[in-house]
Image: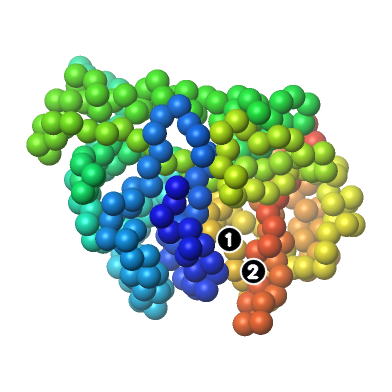
């Protein structure tokens, strides 16, 4: 499903944070293998898909000199994670041989009201495409079926996988086939367009009980655990010796990499957790192991949530 699955280990060897995020965006598997709407990796018909080594070389050169990527990302002050994800895709599509990025974030309006946006319009050897992008993090249920996407919640307790899929299916993806969307497409001389989605992210399973993955989940989807704060002592007692990081939302994408000075011992992490005990926000923790290079790399991630979760955040 991802034409670059053979490059999955590449990001671990990159050092610049934004380049690592870019590699994660392009190389990671989607959350779903089966969906109600066609899924398509935006680079499926690129020259890179025919010769993945060329994509690897581009990412490695970018890691050595990330100035072009940094300048591209600096053009917007909005640091929302979903927008960052889209901007990384746009940067890659502008560079990808065999793909033309026609437009991004095309607003569909009626009477001064915005009805929605088309995330990407691209042209490649397979035709013209309207692609909706999403990057989501969902936590599985404790006491009901994990098979039902409606039971997978965002860390804030409000967003649901089922609701997101319904919004994509019923509202976002049909935009390009609507009369207003069709009129907008004439600006790029598009007569027929294929609407597709690409949904990246992570699924987090309750610890220690776990649950079934949502129906249609990709067998190789990225995963972690979640637990209530009251469960942390039990989790820490059985965890292998490691160092830790608390990831800010802006660093939720690529697998974490740190040096010793920017990581925490278990004792330091527990002090941090004590000091932040009153915070209602979920914390994304990563467990790190040292590799031969001396750097510490993520081996596991988990959400630590307040004890009354999933009560939505205020």
Tell which residue pokes out farthest to the bottom in this image. Answer: 293
> Which residue is labeled 2 in the image?
297
| Colour mode of the rendering | rainbow
Cβ atoms at labels 2 and 1 below 8 Å apart: yes
Which residue is pictured at 71% across the width and 26% down the height? 145
> In the rendered view, does 82 fall on the left or right side of 263?
left
- Residue 254 percent across, percent down from the top left: 53, 59
> Which residue is labeled 1 in the image?
255
- Residue 177 percent across, percent down from the top left: 24, 24
Q: Which mark is residue 67?
A: none
Q: Is residue 136 visible?
A: no
Which residue is pictured at 50% across the width and 54% down the height? 28
Q: 242 or 72, which lies in front?
A: 242
Q: Is residue 21 above or below residue 200?
A: below
Q: 144 or 116, which lies in front?
A: 144
Which residue is pictured at 52% across the width and 39% down the height? 32
């Amino acid at each position: 499903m991802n034409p670059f699955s053979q490059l999955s280990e590449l990001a671990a060897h990159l050092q610049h944070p934004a380049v690592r995020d870019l590699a994660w965006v392009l190389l990671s598997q989607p959350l779903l293998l089966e969906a109600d709407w066609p899924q398509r990796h935006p680079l499926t018909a690129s020259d890179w898909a025919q010769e993945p080594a060329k994509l690897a070389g581009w990412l490695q050169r970018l890691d050595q000199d990330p100035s072009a990527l940094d300048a591209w990302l600096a053009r917007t002050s909005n640091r929302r994670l979903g927008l960052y994800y889209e901007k990384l895709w746009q940067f890659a599509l502008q560079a990808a041989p065999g793909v033309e990025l026609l437009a991004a974030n095309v607003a569909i309006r009626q009477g001064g009201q915005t009805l929605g946006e088309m995330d990407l319009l691209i042209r490649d050897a397979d035709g013209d495409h309207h692609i909706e992008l999403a990057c989501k993090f969902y936590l599985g249920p404790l006491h009901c079926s994990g098979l039902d996407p409606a039971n997978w919640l965002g860390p804030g307790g409000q967003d649901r996988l089922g609701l997101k899929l319904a919004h994509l299916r019923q509202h976002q993806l049909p935009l390009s086939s609507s009369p207003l969307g069709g009129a907008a497409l004439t600006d790029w001389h598009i007569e027929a367009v294929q609407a597709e989605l690409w949904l990246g992210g992570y699924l987090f399973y309750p610890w220690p009980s776990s649950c079934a993955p949502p129906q249609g989940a990709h067998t190789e989807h990225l995963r972690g655990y979640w637990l209530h704060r009251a469960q942390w002592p039990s989790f820490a007692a059985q965890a292998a010796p490691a160092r830790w990081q608390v990831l800010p939302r802006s660093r939720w994408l690529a697998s974490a990499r740190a040096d010793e000075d920017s990581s925490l011992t278990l004792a330091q992490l527990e002090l941090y957790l004590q000091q932040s005990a009153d915070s209602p926000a979920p914390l994304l923790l990563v467990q790190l192991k040292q590799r031969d290079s001396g750097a510490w790399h993520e081996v596991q991630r988990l959400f630590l949530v307040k004890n009354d979760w999933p009560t939505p955040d205020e």
